[in-house]
Image: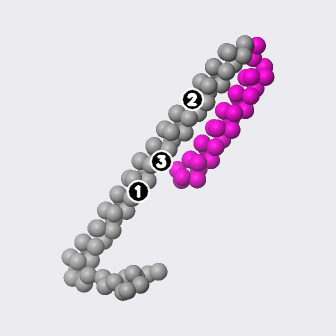
Amino acid sequence: MSENQVGSKVTFFLVGLGIGALVGVLFAPKSGEDTREYLMDKADEGREYAQRKARELRDRADDLVERGKNVVQRQKDFGFRRGGSRPRRFPEGKIEGAVV
């Protein structure tokens, strides 16, 4: 699942949470104190959900970075084993023979 899809799901969840809380306030025959407690609980649930999703995204990003590093290292090792020379860096930071 792409980050964009996860972000939109989180957004939809939070919007739904807000709408549900509003409808609950309008139609629930509760006292003010009960309503405030209910809204605080729902806000806490939303915050915890957002934090959990942020942790999951961060873990996925860390995973992808690590996998990318491994791929680059394997490509470097493979090139050296085949007798390839080490890529030369030019002053602009470009690598000779790299496709841009």
In this rendering, the answer to whether 74 lies above or below 48 is below
The one nearer the camera, 96 or 40, is: 40
Q: Is residue 96 visible?
A: no
Q: Is residue 76 visible?
A: yes
Image marks 1 and 2: residues in contact by CB distance under 8 Å: no
- Whole-percent x, y for residue 68 in the image: 37, 62
In this rendering, the answer to whether 24 lies above or below 81 is above
N-term-proximal mark, 3 vs 2: 2
- Whole-percent x, y for residue 45 in the image: 56, 29
In 3D space, how far apart are the residues under numbered discs 1 and 2 (Cα atoms)?
30 Å
Say which residue appears at 35% left-offset and 57% top-offset.
66
Instruction: Residue under label 1, please give it.
Output: 64
- Let me know if residue 62 is in the magenta part: no
Instruction: Residue under label 3, please give it.
Output: 57
Q: Secondary structure at mark 1?
A: helix
Q: Could you tell me the amino acid type at mark 1? A: Leu
Q: Could you tell me the amino acid type at mark 2? A: Asp
Q: Secondary structure at mark 2?
A: helix
Q: Closer to the observer: label 3 or label 2? A: 2
- Whole-percent x, y for residue 2 in the image: 54, 53
Outermost residue toward the right in this view: 26
N-term-proximal mark, 1 vs 2: 2
Task: Determine which quarter of the picture holds residue 67.
Answer: bottom left
Instruction: Residue under label 2, please give it.
Output: 44
Say which residue appears at 34% left-offset and 63% top-offset.
69
The one nearer the camera, 31 or 67, is: 31
Q: Which residues are magenta?
A: 1-30
